[in-house]
Image (tube, rainbow, N blue to C red):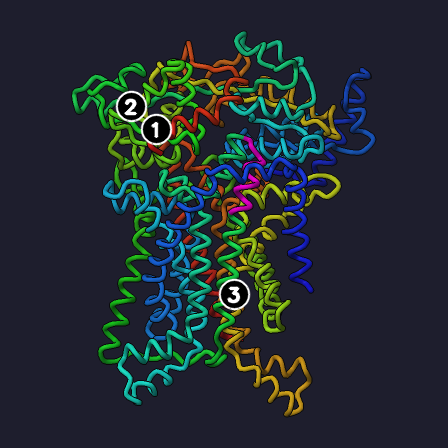
Amino acid sequence: MKRIPARFAVVLSASALALAACSSDSATEPETEATTDGPVTVQLLTHDSFALSEDVIAEFEDTSGIDIELVSGGDAGSMVAGAILAAGAPTADVMFGVDNTLITRALDEGVFEPYTSPEAESLRPDLADQTFDGLVTPIDFGDVCINIDDTWFEAEGIAPPTTLEDLADPTYSGLLVVQDPGTSSPGLAFLLSTVARYGDEWPDYWQRLKDNDVAVAGSWSDAYYGDFTFGGGGDRPIVVSYATSPPAEIVYAEGEPPETVSTSSMDDGCYRQIEYAGILAGSDNVEAAQQVVDWLLSVPVQEDIPLNMFVFPARADIPLPEVFTEFAGQVEDPEQLPADYVAENVEGLLTEWGSVMGR
Amino acid sequence: MVPALFLLAFLAIPLASLGREIISPGTAGYLLDPLPWRVAGLAAGQALVSTALALAIGLPMANVLTRYRFPGRRWALALATVPFVLPTVVVALAFRALLGGSLGSGFAIVVLAHAYLNLAVVVRIVGARWVTIDPRMELTARSLGAGPWTAFRTVTLSALRPAIASAAAIVFVFSFTSLGVVLLIGDSSTRTLESLVLRQTSILLDFQAAAVSAAIQAVVVGSVLVWAARQRALQRGGSARPMRSIRPHGRARWAVGAVAVVAAVIVLAPVLALVWASLRSSSGWTLAWWSGLFGPNTIDAGSTRIGSPLSAMARSLIFALATGLVAALVGGLAAVSVLTGRIGRAFAIATALPLGISAATLGLGTLLAYGRPPLDLRATGLLVPIAHALIAVPLVVAVATPTLRATDPRLVTVAANLGARPTRAWWTGYGPAMRTVMVAAGGLACAVSLGEFGAASFLARADGPTVPLVIARLLGRPGEASFGVAAALAVVLVIMTTTLVAAVDRGGRRT
């Protein structure tokens, strides 16, 4: 199962340490600390959607002598809220999964302890400078995109929409379902993408969507499984979801993976969410925590990320799985807003969205 | 006092830890913001309608299920607890599947879902009292010339009123503080302070505003609970012992049958929709989702994505039993203290406060108090059952108090006069009632734990999820298998609940 029995783990890591001690006398090896008080446990605070392969975690625990304890913080927002409230006396050593809509507040409250991983040299060029003065490390990113039920459009003989503008076109009246940005993370990302695209004119765009009979669901599950024609019994063939939802449809199909999938991701109007990891200020295990951050950005974890969390690895040198290259939306030019702009304006944006939509 | 220490340690201290991080002199200024007040008004209206609907459906069910004898009654009673534990997201999707697009999202469907989810509260709380009312009293009233309605109203209904007030207060509070249903299928007309708190904490990160919203919610809930306690204190009378159930005959037989059938349809329809979803795929009938739970290739084996469904079931079961035990003990003692006068009554109201405190608030507070050095209790696995017990204790008190109050204290005096020692005398007087209510309450507490999501999402270990957490993880991602396995797991949750509650009921009757 997930956890190696404690006694066995001690033997394992003790022998690993003995090996390390024999093979290396480099003083920079942090294991020297571990030899004095047995295996170190690093608490890794994550959100509900975190996932890795068990053997990737076990492999790291075996070779490093560090036990990883996964600590759940609820959804991403609640996790960050908890970390801010506990700033300085944290409930874990490392936090993974704080994204670019929430990170400014966490940075302002002094949640993180600076650390630049040597692995950061391998980051994609567009993420390399996204470390907020060396306080956090980008680990993965994902795009919130419009998803389309291609089979439905084929059957109706209508060309599917390709741009944000199309969504406001009467041809697609009554076909789109979005999520309430006040309660749903992809819903907020889609709102931010329209703000990035239309600037101050964004309320006008939403007015046009409203006139075009857009449906607003409370949550991603409700929209995807309740309203979307493909996911369930819904009657709307256009939904706000992720660029990686089509490959997920293949991986989580019944029995043998099908060769193709009837949904696709629209490339226009996607909003990019970047997820970061950082060491929580006040951690007692800074050295071991640094190793965990290095590990999150190491090749084995980065290769493991796509099919576990359905997001893209932050390293430049990771080949993507075939379902990703074939069916995921490859977004060249995603919409983005500066993190501090989002932090300052999100409340106003939500209020104005509410008054436009009558919600 | 055990309950006092328990509340201090796991309610007061966590809230204080949270308060210390948040409250500042500027916080009071947020009281002038009209937003939380407007939301409170909306939520109160919604909760009133939800409560009325839950009573309208729940009272006939409570009558039939607790007073009449018919085949399968015990299972029917256990089944009536099912709506209470179904994960909200599951109920929401089932309702949408059943009612189609006709209701969409919004006020009507939210109110229906709340009434459905809280049926068990009405059936259990009112039922626990109803079994102790001697049906012969109503017959006596009839024989003295009262019509059936007058007899029912003057005898049964007036004896039930405290229990109905208890149940109504709790349904109101649950609907007023609802989160999952509101997020999933609600719209602007059904916002609650709870959803406002969530937005303020986890999107806006405006903790002071959240503290004010949470405080307004706690005050409303506290007032409702005080009102319910007053109602309970108004009346006495009736018997402490459960009456023998009646075998219905004549016209009553038809009425009982009709209510039983309608109740079964209402309770079972979403469950059947789930069973159907767990057996269907795009290519027809399939057992793939069930083998994804139990087969050699369980869903996501080898990844921490979902976690083993079987170990989640075992974990949920252990948490539920621990919760049932702790809640029945703490809640039972708290209910007893109600009998001891003014301080006891105030204390019993205090035990009900967790109802008004959001799972998120409680979860965050517990995390700050017991989730970091010097005292990190997360690894012990105790935090989830403790949080669940906190949520369940108010229900135990609500079930126990009306019945205990109805017990004639002279029984104790009589036993004492006959030479029993004080403890023995107390048990002679209150024992039978205690046993009935503790069993009803313990079952409800188990059910609370099995279905609870919010607090567990903070306090369960990421690699040790409970069944509702696993269901939520599955439903949070695309793919046929995700939905199918989630449906199968929800059916398992229904079976676990029904079995566990029926077992608790049966065990309780036997002792």
Identify which residue is drawn at 51% across, 48% down.
B217
Magenta-drawn stretch contains A93:
no
The disc placed on residue A178 is 1
Quarter of the view holding residue B40 = top left
Identify which residue is drawn at 49% across, 49% down.
B452
**Are discs 2 and 3 both within one chain?**
no
Identify which residue is drawn at 54% across, 7% down.
A125
Disc 1 versus disc 3: distance between alpha carbons? 44 Å
- Image coordinates of residue B34 in percent, x first then y, are 47, 38
Q: Mark 2 points at which residue?
A: A209
Residue type at mark 2 is: Leu
Q: Are marks 1 and 2 in contact (CB under 8 Å)?
A: yes
The disc placed on residue B209 is none
- Image coordinates of residue A250 in percent, x first then y, are 36, 26
Q: Mark 3 points at which residue?
A: B229
Disc 2 versus disc 3: distance between alpha carbons? 50 Å
Residue type at mark 1 is: Val
- Extreme residue in the top direction: A125
